[in-house]
């Protein structure tokens, strides 16, 4: 990414005639170049920097400035602040300008109080958000998906996007007169920062403060990656309908309750209802009244242990009063599975197809499998 330089610049001449009315461009012109050339925004002794007639820090002055900052051990002598790094998904807007203006006032006020100030600028890679805007741009301008380009070329396009909008963001931050320390500019995927993140997680793990375990995630079969909870918008389906799902050619029925039965070992059966019948391939239990101790037989995996468990999660007035439990593919079932020590069986591949755990349905798209399971159950 292009770094903002600090060219030699004279102080603005204030004796010249001024416009008859307020002209922001006239007022602002020239100040930023002079501020940068004098090093006013660097975390160091500014008196020492002004003594340099060239107005530009030499390597030795930079070294002394860094040493001076390091020696300011008392909190009262320094003020450190990191700009909330804007996402490189696009240009900044008026909301960013407001935030930067408030932070700039804090930084300048603390300099006036004699503190050593470090206000760190930077931009954030934004992860999936940036990937999405690049994909939309490719589809709009070239009618191509990231799969059409291939991984290497798509990653290159993402970095090109970051370079373009990262530089634009830097210029915008400068344009509003921000007194950030440009020498400390950071990108959240810089090698140094990435290593620091890894190091932090390693240390936390070694201290027993974080751990790794099996958890349920929101997986996008289209993006082929996990999504954080803040990137997922929940939508309540009030009645049966059809929706378009990225990566599947036909409308998908949602909000429908599919009923089927599990045979009980020794005779009898238990009816259950579900809106995602394809997940029955990963069922390991059915939750009913806590006093019921029956064991079930899975129609496609007779060797699998299927328990009947009692859990207060079950609403006796909803559906059949019995709930199929798929611990690996439902948030509520996940918690029930942990409470009852159930087996977790993952039945989906990263691209949304049924994996080898699906038996005769392996390799089918999950929505195609949804209908094929219904037909097979009717045949039994």
Image: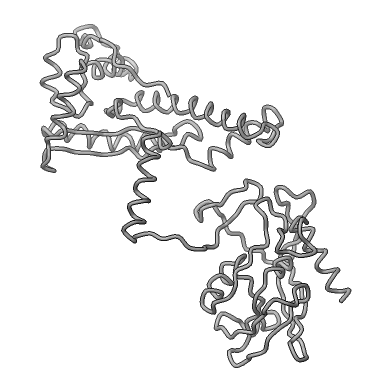
In this rendering, position of residue 369 left or right of residue 168: right
> What x and y, as percent, mark residue 52?
14, 12
Where the C terminus falls, by quadrant?
Answer: bottom right
| Residue 59 higher or lower than 146, as above or below | above
Which of the two residues, 21 or 191, is positioned nearer the viewer here? 191
> What x and y, as percent, mark residue 184?
30, 29
Which of the two residues, 124 or 318, is positioned nearer the viewer here? 124
Q: Residue furthest right?
A: 379
Q: Identify the residue at image location x=28%, y=37%.
A: 103
Q: Residue furthest bottom?
A: 291
Identify the coloring: one colour
The answer to which image quadrant residue 158 occupies is: top right
> What x and y, as percent, mark residue 174?
34, 24
In this rendering, position of residue 217 left or right of residue 365: left
Q: Identify the residue at image location x=36%, y=28%.
A: 173
The answer to which image quadrant residue 171 occupies is: top left
Where the N terminus falls, by quadrant?
Answer: top left
The answer to which image quadrant residue 308 occupies is: bottom right
């Amino acid at each position: 990414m292009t770094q903002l330089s600090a060219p030699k610049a004279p102080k603005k001449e204030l004796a010249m005639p001024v416009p008859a009315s307020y002209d922001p461009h006239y007022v602002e012109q020239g100040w930023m170049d002079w501020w940068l050339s004098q090093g006013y925004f660097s975390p160091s002794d500014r008196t020492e920097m002004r003594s340099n007639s060239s107005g530009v820090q030499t390597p030795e002055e930079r070294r002394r400035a860094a040493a001076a900052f390091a020696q300011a051990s008392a909190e009262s002598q320094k003020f450190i602040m990191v700009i909330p790094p804007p996402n490189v998904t696009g240009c900044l807007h008026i909301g960013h300008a407001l935030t930067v203006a408030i932070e700039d006032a804090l930084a300048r006020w603390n300099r006036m109080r004699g503190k050593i100030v470090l206000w760190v600028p930077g931009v954030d890679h934004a992860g999936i958000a940036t990937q999405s805007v690049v994909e939309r741009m490719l589809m709009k301008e070239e009618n191509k998906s990231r799969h059409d380009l291939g991984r290497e070329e798509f990653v290159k396009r993402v970095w090109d996007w970051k370079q373009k909008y990262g530089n634009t963001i830097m210029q915008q931050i400068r344009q509003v007169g921000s007194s950030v320390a440009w020498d400390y500019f950071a990108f959240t995927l810089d090698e140094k920062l990435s290593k620091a993140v890894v190091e932090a997680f390693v240390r936390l793990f070694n201290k027993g403060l974080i751990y790794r375990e099996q958890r349920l995630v929101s997986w996008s079969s289209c993006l082929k990656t996990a999504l954080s909870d803040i990137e997922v918008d929940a939508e309540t389906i009030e009645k049966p309908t059809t929706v378009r799902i990225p990566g599947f050619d036909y409308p998908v029925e949602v909000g429908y309750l599919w009923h089927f039965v599990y045979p009980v070992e020794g005779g009898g059966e238990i009816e259950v209802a579900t809106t995602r019948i394809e997940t029955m391939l990963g069922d390991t239990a059915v939750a009913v009244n806590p006093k019921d101790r029956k064991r079930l037989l899975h129609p496609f995996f007779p060797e699998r242990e299927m328990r009947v468990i009692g859990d207060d999660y079950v609403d006796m007035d909803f559906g059949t009063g019995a709930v199929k439990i798929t611990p690996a593919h439902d948030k509520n079932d996940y918690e029930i599975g942990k409470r009852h020590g159930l087996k977790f069986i993952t039945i989906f591949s990263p691209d949304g197809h049924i994996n080898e755990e699906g038996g005769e349905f392996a390799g089918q798209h999950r929505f195609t499998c949804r209908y094929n399971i219904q037909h097979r159950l009717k045949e039994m």
